[in-house]
Image (cartoon, rainbow, N blue to C red):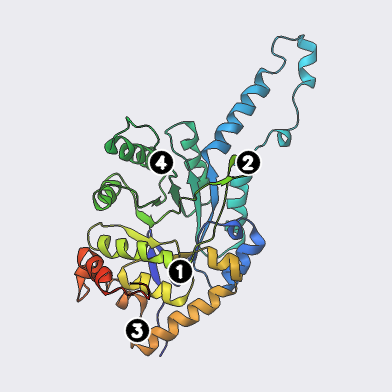
Amino acid sequence: MTVDLTTTYLGLELKNPLMASSSPLTGDVESLLRLQDAGVSGVVLPSLFEEQIEHEAIEVSKLMEYGAESFAEALGGYFPELDDYNTGPEHYLQDISAAKDALDIPVIASLNGTTRGGWVRYAKKLEEAGADALELNVYLIPTDPYATGPDVENRYLDLLRAVKESVTIPVAMKIGPFFSSLAHMARQLVDAGADGLVIFNRFYQPDIDLDELRVVPNLQLSTSMEVRLPLRWIAILRDKVPCSLAATRGLHSADDVLKALLVGADAAMMASALLQQGPAHATEVLAGVSSWLEEHNYESVEQMKGSMSMASAPNPDGFIRANYMRMLATYTSAYA
């Protein structure tokens, strides 16, 4: 029996649910081709950051003002070649075009920012460069003690509306779990125009260098343990919000992908495992997914998708408080 692995995400027809999420592997055409050859059904490019775009605008402004009050006959020598002040965004647009020319699978651009400003206009440029969809990645750490929960939520909603106003391609919101009412926030995002939700962003935590006494970055790749949080919330949201759902964060194996599909994910996005084991790992994962489906007499991904969501599972309480109490009650320790 041949299992049908096709799925639909953001209205895009995918040959299977395994996508490569944003990482250094999706940053150049050669590795993108290796990912495609290994079987991934779509790719999310590395993020274009608000800071990159704003930096370019500042540099261009400096350039235009340079020598403005000097002698007119000298002005011709003040302007450097464009490459001398191209600080990133234009290269990103070229990367999208190159990826679209080289690949036969959907290419999703990623835009990362926190404030509504001029950088949002780049959403349209990403679309014009050929992106099939856009992932809006909001990495926001609220630090103002006077900012309320609704203030923070409105930042997300304002950004989403601004982006949706400027593009016609589908837009997915990549969010973290840190909302006081995540289900309500998810619904607000869909009502504001989100075509999909990517669950969840990993908020990397800084470290302290004890010798230099300074804050330093410390990137740790995910582990399969982390997949449990997105699994729970996709299961809860599956039948509550009318949009595509993608699982990301902690997907390393065929088992992780299968669990994401069972709770209701339309796509499973992988990064850390591909970085650690190479693009060929995707082939192994897809083989495992197909084998499991055949062994359990599923004819397609669509047939099993969401069958273990909170609304469909035989024990839905397992996703909420009852499971919490059961875990605490049944845990044993050699020192207890």
- Cα distance, mark 2 to mark 4? 20 Å
Q: Is residue 330 above or below residue 98?
A: below
- Label 4 sits on residue: 163
Q: Residue at x 35, y 55 (%)?
A: 196
Mark 2–mark 4 CB contact (< 8 Å)? no
- Mark 3 or mark 1: name the one nearer the start of the chain: 1
- Provide the secondary structure element on which disc 2 rests: loop
Q: Quadrant of the C terminus?
A: bottom left
For badge 2, the amino acid type reads: Gly
For badge 4, the amino acid type reads: Val
Q: Is residue 24 visible?
A: yes
Horizontal relation, residue 106 to residue 1: left or right: right
- Label 1 sits on residue: 224
- Label 2 sits on residue: 88
Mark 4–mark 1 CB contact (< 8 Å)? no
Q: Residue at x 59, y 67 (%)?
A: 276
Q: Is residue 148 above or below residue 100?
A: above
For badge 1, the amino acid type reads: Ser
- Label 3 sits on residue: 299
